[in-house]
Amino acid sequence: MNHFDVFGLERRLRIDLELLQRRFHELSRRHHPDFHQGAAPAEQAQALETSALVNAAYRTLRDPIARVDYLVRLEEGRETREGATVKPTAPPALLQEMFEIQEALQEAKAGGLGASDREALAAQRERLLVRSRDEEARLTGPLSEAWDNGAPDEHARLLGELKEGLATLAYLKTAIDDLGAVLDGDQETHVTHRRH
Amino acid sequence: MSRIVGIDLGTTNSLVAYLDDKTGLPRVIPDQDGKVLLPSIVSFTPAGVLVGEAARRQLVRRPETTVYSVKRFMGRGYEDVKEELCYFPFRVCPADGIVRLQVGDREVTPPEVSAIVLRVLKERAEVHFGEPVDRAVITVPAYFNDSQRQATKDAGRIAGLDVARIVNEPTAASLAYGLQRLEHGVIAVYDLGGGTFDISILKVKDGIFEVLATSGNTHLGGDDFDRAVVLWLLEDIRERHGVYLGGDREAMQELRLAAEAAKVRLSSTERTTLTIPFADFTYHREIGRGDLEKLIESLVAKTLGPCRLALADAGLRPSDIDEIVLVGGSTRVPLVRRRVQALFGKTPHSQLNPDEVVALGAAVQAHILAGGITHMLLLDVTPLSLGIETLGGIVSVLIPRNTTIPTSARELFTTSVDGQRVVDLHVVQGERELAKDCRSLARFELSGIDPMPAGMPKIEVTFLIDANGILQAQARELRTGKVAAIEVKPTYGLSEADVERMVEESFAYAEADVATRLLIEMRNEADTVLTHVERALRQGRDLVGPEERARIEAAVGALREARQGEDRDRIRELTSELNRVTEPLAERLMDAALKRALSTRRAAEILEGP
């Protein structure tokens, strides 16, 4: 049973979040271990397992990016998490750009961070944050819509675009985190983009 | 299904509550003197173990064997706590694994000390219901890691309690509030207790309490406020009296108690005075609320970071919060309230007693588990990311923080050498990239793998975090379908055998402890009667003849002597004997007092006129 099946939803990228939450609550009321305390051990274990599955499915589907990521894995037949996943491919231009950012970071770290370096890196981070948000919007908006409405013969191409979008986001996030680590010191402030 | 009680096992105080079937509301259970809060203090004396108020009175007399704030040590290692040990008068053995306290010639672990507190609450509930109580929901700080939760569960078992659920304190508090006014909206629970801080953000809808995010600090609370005041007092005493009391365990304990009391008073008054009589001098000092606020300002500020992180994890802004609930005794401090209000831009509320609300919520959760409430459901999260150490000491996260529990993750492992039959896994908890910076939870050993070329076996390990926030693991070899043996070596925990042994020992201690407590209570009663009789003899000097006086004095002498001994029945006998011989005197005293009252009233009536 995949995550969409858990909630009785079609395998689509744009879903009714209200409906998702309602079904999540219904299933939680039915399967949560709290309501099976007096049951036989086997039933308790079953409730625990079902409840864990429902929670994992809800967590994945309510987040539009995690939803895209999950759907791609589902389409490629890699449902379960694996140790060595196939690395997503990003556009070569992006890779070149990321490489330059890492180089600039290394230099800045080696030479000590002057005020102007700091300013340049902060500006760089701002630009990347904007791009990251734009990419997210493209992925969860037009691209998701295209996938849901796409004809079967377009699926391979669209899947490629979704994967490229995910890879771009991952690279941008790494660069933003690395910039953050240098700019904010060792604080644990990697809270850049998460949502419910 | 048997009754389940709710227990708040606090750093400073502990309490037990249940859900009253008649009213449908949770209620705390008082002790025989009507007191609800049991100080979480255990004193190991030559005569036996004392708990609560009786143990508190030993803090200054027996600083080395009176254990308080043991919650700060639960599920922790020596390395974790060694820096703050200088603030505690009792000794901690420098050993690997969990913290071990040296009290006299006995070595005890934090779960055993907590179990002693839990047992008193269990007995209190049993007296209240007139029947055995053996199931409980116990609360822990939301930010407690796996080891700290497991240690709490162990404590319950050692106390003879089946722990039906470990519940997070802030979420328990939200249940207590939710039961009374079921509302829809987003709540932030700010919980600052004696030793720990938690922030939890929940969405409440149709009876479902869904935690969106939680954060905190398991080493930040009222104890740290007291410590800041003590350090300041130490300097002040050095300046004014030329002595440094830092190394004096008894003096430090006096200072700590005085600092705590002053802090509490400063929540309701602007200024207060501390007076501490030491052997060579009496320390006298006035302290204002502003002085206290200067000392604790940076500590209070440390709670705001986790608040912001929880908001970010929940994807919310401060203005999205509909209500802020304050929990924990330290939220009575005005500075704390001001800072919380400034952060969220709203007045926090605290209609329910912040000392009791967690226990009340635990009772609600207990009732849900017992099947008594079906419209409410709590969906909590795991506070810390769970991962495994991979090549190069890097953490691979399997379950991210703030994932709704129960939750599970599967991971495939294989061998790296031909014919390898055992695979070791290191499971950690935390948000850092390197395993060494995270909390080591356990080392798992997968054994019984059939010999195969390297990389051939496919072992699937399922990590499951249950509704208690505690990790369970299962392993399976995919080719053969064989369940692999998995041995868990907790890094900071008790082994199954340790717990079994402690459960057995606790039964032996339990009997001795009950006997000791009864003896002490009997002595206290004797003391009360002795004090009364002395006062009666003074007041009734003219009402007692020499023969009667001799009889009374003989009874007093006999009781005083018996009181020194251990024979509880003899003390009881002589106490009632003394009561009996002084009865006529007591009656005469009462008569005299009555006559005096009447005559003064008559005089007053005459003076006032008709």
Image (cartoon, rainbow, N blue to C red):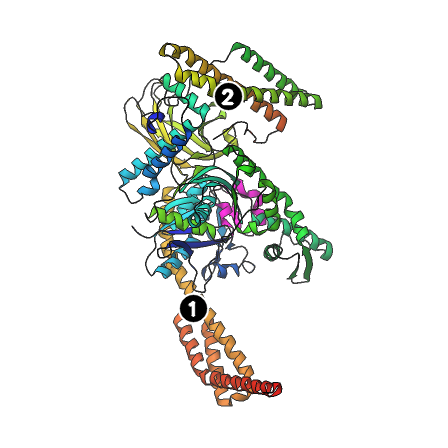
Inspect the image, locate mark 2, and give the three-letter code of the amino acid beneath it: Ala
Name the image quarter holding the C terminus of chain B: bottom right
Q: Residue at x 64, y 57 (%)?
A: B269
In percent of width and height, residue A118 lies at 67, 23
Instruction: Evaluate whether residue A33 shows in this view.
Output: yes
Please tell me if label 2 and label 1 are on a single chain. Answer: no
Residue position marked by numbered label 2 in the rendering: A137
Residue B420: horizontal and vertical position, in percent? 36, 22
- Residue B416 in view: no
Instruction: Give the residues in magenta.
Output: B68-97
User: How far is mark 2 from mark 1, CA to CA?
Assistant: 78 Å
Figure quadrant of residue B488: top left
Instruction: Indicate whether A126 appears above or below B502.
Output: above
* Horizontal relation, residue B608 to residue B525: left or right: right
Mark 2–mark 1 contact, CB under 8 Å?
A: no
> Pointer 1: what residue?
B566
The amino acid pointed to by label 1 is: Glu
Q: Residue at x 36, y 28 (%)?
A: B461
Q: Chain of mark 2?
A: A
Q: Magenta stretch containing residue B89, yes or no?
A: yes
For this view, does B334 lie left or right of residue B133?
A: right
Q: Element type at marker 1?
A: loop
- Image label count: 2
Please name whichever residue, A45 or A75, is drawn nearer the observer in this view of the structure. Answer: A75
Asked which secondary structure carries label 2, the reply is helix
